[in-house]
Image: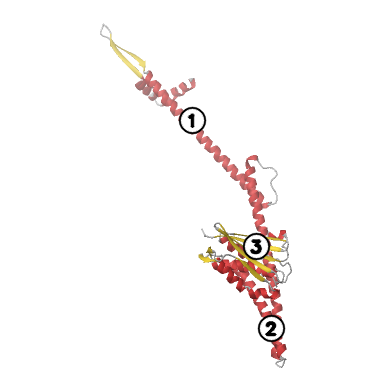
Amino acid sequence: MTGCFFLIYILDIWFNGAIADFFYSNFVGVNYYRTETGATYTTEYIILSRVYWAMLIVLLILVCGLVVTLCLVSYRQRKKQQTQTILEAGRLIRYLAQHPATVPQEIPAEYAEISAQIFSLTASMERQKRLLQEESQRKNDLITYLAHDLKTPLTSIIGYLSLLEEVPSLPQEQKEKYTKIALEKSLRLERLINEFFDITRYNLHEMVLETQTFDLSYLLRQLAEEFYPLLQPKQNTIQLQIPETMPIQGDPDKLARVFQNLLKNAASYSYPNSPIRLTAGEEQDKILLTVENQGKTIPAYRLNSIFEKFFRLDESRSTDSGGAGLGLAIAREIVTLHSGSIWVKSENEHTVFSVMLPKQQK
């Protein structure tokens, strides 16, 4: 208190008594009275009510000032803490970027959650990077194999056609034999070239749906008829178990490609003289379709990769079956675009591909 009065005294001297004059004029009252002799006297007194109000205002000002000061201090402290958190997070990110397979040994408790999330994100990015590298390697290997395999049918075609041209006197039966072989090799060459185009087209554009309402049962019957020539070499058949009509909203051309790929896959890996069962049914607001064939059981460890790009069940280098490994990957992408799902089960020499599609697109 003494210090406050001393400070006020110094300030009053500084301001040439202005503080004392202000106090006197606002907080001091004067009483005038005369004596019997006619002299005039004055008495001075402090106006306590004004002093109380002044003290209250000063107190409020001090409290407000204290609150503002505390808020500013707290704000600066939070900003400082946030800056430290950002700097520490940046340090952790740099460390994990340089050492993705390790975690810093000493992590402050307050940064444990941040570091865990960063590590999880880094691990996910590394896993995605590894998958992309594996996919790229499969693609490069496949292109190398296809390029090599293009030479064989082309050499045969040139050889047989040259022989027919150089020896026109060959017996008719032998000419027909060589012509048939040349045609088979030409068809083989066409399939290989189409696989090259599939690889290129898959990476050069994104699929866009052109939805409309159509009868899925009619589409499936058409596909079954179109596959008849493809099934003849191994005497396979397609058994349909589908409703008479089954309206659905979607892209008919792209959904046709889904079931073409599934039927082609089934035909490639089915045992001779075995049926391929194509079934469909409605489940509330969805449609479930399955394609089942009899063939070698797909190992469980390979089922997780079967829908990946450039993955082929045929582990040999020959491309006589399995195509470019894009059919099932494209099927999954189309089904996903239709807000559906696709999965596969294989056991006891029976493989079943299942597709669930909504009847209406949102």
Instruction: Identify residue for label 3.
Output: 353
Mark 3 vs 1, N-terminal side: 1
Up the image or down, 329 lies above or below 11; here it is: below
Give the CA separation, mark 3 to mark 1.
73 Å
Total count of labels: 3
Tell which tag, 2 or 3, sits nearer the viewer: 3
Residue 350, visible in the rendered structure: yes
Estimate how packed mark 3 is, as few (under 14), some (14 to 19) or many (20 or more) residues with alpha carbons within 10 Å.
some
Check disc 3 and give the amino acid type: Phe
Q: Position of residue 5 (x, y in %)?
A: 46, 21
Estimate how packed mark 1 is, as few (under 14), some (14 to 19) or many (20 or more) residues with alpha carbons within 10 Å.
few
At 67% from the left edge and 42% from the top edge, which residue is drawn? Answer: 107
Instruction: Identify residue for label 1.
Output: 66
At 47% from the left edge and 31% from the top edge, which residue is drawn? Answer: 65
Mark 2 vs 3, N-terminal side: 2
Report whether 315 appears left or right of 203.
Answer: right
Check disc 1 and give the amino acid type: Leu
Up the image or down, 240 lies above or below 96; here it is: below
Give the CA separation, mark 2 to mark 1.
100 Å
Q: Position of residue 224 (x, y in %)?
A: 61, 71
- Residue extending furthest toward the front: 244
Camera-nearest residue between 324 and 285: 285
Instruction: Identify residue for label 2.
Output: 180
Camera-nearest residue between 287 and 312: 287
Estimate how packed mark 2 is, as few (under 14), some (14 to 19) or many (20 or more) residues with alpha carbons within 10 Å.
few
